């Protein structure tokens, strides 16, 4: 919808069509060093076990266990998004 709107197309839905359907929480996992003011930390990802994905939990990640984390890219390892009916 964002791309279509930016191209000048109208939204396909109206505000009254948007319904509240529970709560979502996103946590981001970064390769940072907390002992050095959270600067990005490079190196091999020795152990990485992401949570299991379910209909209520989504994991967006760009690395796997054993991958190299370099200083040439964003140090974000993953985003974990959970959804439930209430907090």
Image: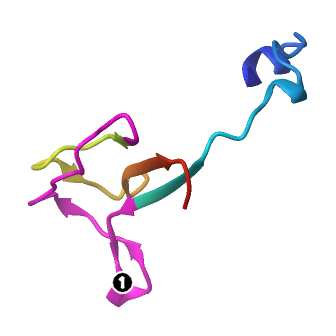
Q: Is residue 53 left or right of residue 85?
A: left
Q: Specify the farthest residue to the bottom.
A: 35
Q: How is the image coloured?
A: rainbow
Residue 31, quarter of the rendered image: bottom left
Left or right for 20, reference 29: right
Q: Residue at x 25, y 44 (%)?
A: 63
Q: Vertical placement of 5 versus 50: above or below?
A: above
| In the image, residue 50 above or below residue 6 | below
Residue 76 point in image, percent of width and height? 40, 55
Task: Determine which quarter of the picture holds residue 71.
Answer: bottom left
Q: Which quarter of the rendered picture does the N terminus lie within?
A: top right
Residue 87 location, x and y as percent? 54, 61
Q: Secondary structure at mark 1?
A: helix
Q: In this rendering, is residue 66 above or below 37?
A: above
Q: Please state which of residues 51 and 71 is positioned toward the viewer in this rendering.
A: 51
* Mark 1, residue position: 34
Residue at point 45%, 59% (across, down)? 27
Residue at image coords 78%, 30%: 18
| Position in image of residue 56 (x %, y %) | 40, 41
Residue name at image x 26 percent, y 64 percent: 42
Q: Is residue 42 magenta?
A: yes
Q: Is residue 82 left or right of residue 70?
A: right
Dot 1 crowding, Cα within 10 Å, few <14, some 14–19, many 20+: few
Most distant residue in the front direction: 85
- Which residue is at the front of the view, 8 or 71? 8
Residue 25 position within the rendered picture, expressed as x and y whole percent measured from the top left = 52, 55
Count every numbered label the image shows and give the total: 1
Q: Is residue 55 magenta?
A: yes
- Residues rendered magenta in the picture: 29-57
């Amino acid at each position: 919808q964002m791309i279509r709107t930016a191209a000048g197309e109208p939204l396909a839905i109206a505000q009254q069509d948007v319904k509240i359907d529970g709560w979502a929480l996103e946590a981001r996992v970064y390769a940072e060093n907390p002992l050095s003011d959270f600067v990005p930390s490079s190196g091999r990802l020795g152990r990485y076990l992401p949570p299991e994905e379910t209909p209520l939990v989504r994991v967006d990640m760009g690395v796997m266990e054993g991958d190299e984390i370099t200083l040439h890219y964003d140090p974000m390892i993953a985003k974990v998004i959970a959804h439930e009916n209430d907090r």
